[in-house]
Amino acid sequence: MNEKISSLFDNEIQGNEIDSLLSKKDRGSDIREAMQSYQMISDAIQGKRLPKNNLTDKIMAAIDKEPTQLSGFVATKESLGQNTSPSEYWPMAASFAALFVIGLTVFNGDSIKAGNNLVLVKSDIPEDIIIAHHASTSTNMKYFIKTKD
Amino acid sequence: MTVKIIISFLLLSALNPVLALDNPWDIINKAAEASKKLSYKGIFHSQHSDDIKSIEITHAFHGSDEYGSDEYTRINMLDGDFGEAFADAKNVVVYHSNKNDVIMQKRKNQHLFPAIFPINPEILKDNYELSFGNKERVAGRNSQIVVLRPLDKYRNFYHFWLDEETSIPLKMIVSDEDNNIFEQSSFANITFEQSSNLSWFKPSINNKKQDIIEKKSDELSVSNRFWKLKNTLPGFKEVDQITQRIPGLNVLSHQLVYSDGLAYVSLFIRPVAKDKKPKVGEVRIGSTNISARYYNGYQIMSVGSVPFSTVKHFSESVQF
């Protein structure tokens, strides 16, 4: 069986044999473990070895929790994890770069000249700013201001 | 000569009780303590700009220990849309009507009248001058007028009518130096009663007719504070930070709250969207002043019921 699994990941199995093997993988933990091992080995041989601890997934999850900011990135060793090697920074760097490009596409960065600013008028004030201010600071009935649904 | 000085001092003391006290600020300390450590129930009128509402407050104090204060407050709006707030030592929950349902939302804190003083009122000494005024009746009770006059141009005037018997604030007016009133709250009636019964500490919602929908907080914890403030105003300290994700985008909006113990300023730091032009300048909405500034791709806005010079100072202080 292990031989067949190895062949599967090396693209040496075709047609019905693939279906047969995949249907068997759900039946036993031994087969599942063997498939995971061969997957890792195959990736390593083909230069696709995953970083330790599934780092990419962890970084993507961390990025999702710590959304993009256009300035002030402060990367510390602690924030990157202590067990990472330099080669493992690449997926993270790529992710940050991608999000940074998105940020620059959607947001202005610091490209706006002073003359392009508009003079503030009442209608420019986002309602949620006024609501957020009163909901967290008010000493009067404005405290009961309705926050947006 | 010495006799003349003593006589002058005694005459002044008789006219102005502030001189007769060992520490005039004790009256503010007592007022702060009374609003937290007395059990009371009353109705006060609350005005902000042109808007006036009646509010009922029930407050119970069941003692305190090293772990905190056993304090319960229920505040409900008597006018307009349904609104209720419940606060104990750790939590604040606000209920709002929404068509046939009720929205429940947790808040981090509340500074509602009459408990408007900071935990440590001593911090006010550095930025306000205390003076005593006349005695007046408020809500059928005798009160002493006390005024906190700002020592600089960055704050408002606070006028308090403090209950002679308990020191609790019965009335408060916030004004500028020209006596333009921005905000006032005044008890119409108040009673003091110590009771261990907490049956009133529950929302007045009809569970059979109304569903309670909890509005989850979308607040995020952010350690990457990429900004800093240069030249912060005397006495103003950061008391809160609220960070939320701008809906639909992987970008954060930061709200920093600063207070000198009485006045509050919110400072918002948000990236400017590509299709938007940043705004600069100052406007007033009611008694709330707003100052906007564009800086390095971010729209900076500071908001507060404080003088323009204050909000402007905060928005111009942000650096990164």
Image (spheres, rainbow, N blue to C red):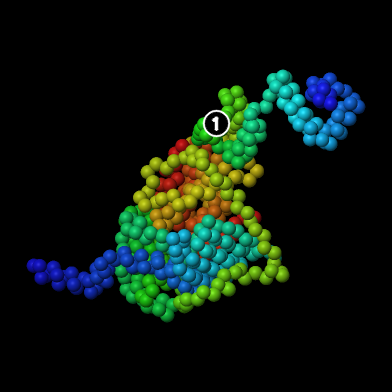
Pinpoint residue B245: horizontal percent, then vertical percent.
60, 45
Q: Nearer the viewer, residue B95 or A23?
A: A23
Q: Nearer the viewer, residue B199 or A108?
A: B199
User: Mark 1 is on which residue type?
Assistant: Gln
Dot 1 corresponds to which residue? A82
Q: Badge 1 local density, few (<14 within 10 Å), some, or many (20+)?
A: few
Q: Residue at x 57, y 46 (%)?
A: B220
Q: Residue at x 47, y 60 (%)?
A: B67
Pinpoint residue A46: horizontal percent, then vertical percent.
72, 19
Q: Residue B202 appears in which quarter of the rendering?
A: bottom right
Pinpoint residue A122: horizontal percent, then vertical percent.
53, 52
Farthest-out residue, bottom: B140
Farthest-out residue, left: B1
Mark 1: which secondary structure? loop
Pinpoint residue B20: horizontal percent, then vertical percent.
24, 70
Q: Residue A13 appears in which quarter of the rendering?
A: top right
Asked whether the viewer can see residue A101, the reply is: no
User: In the picture shown, does residue A69 fall above or below B14?
Assistant: above
Q: Nearer the viewer, residue B272 or B88?
A: B88
User: In the picture shown, does residue A35 fall above or below B16?
Assistant: above
User: In the picture shown, does residue B151 fall above or below B209?
Assistant: above
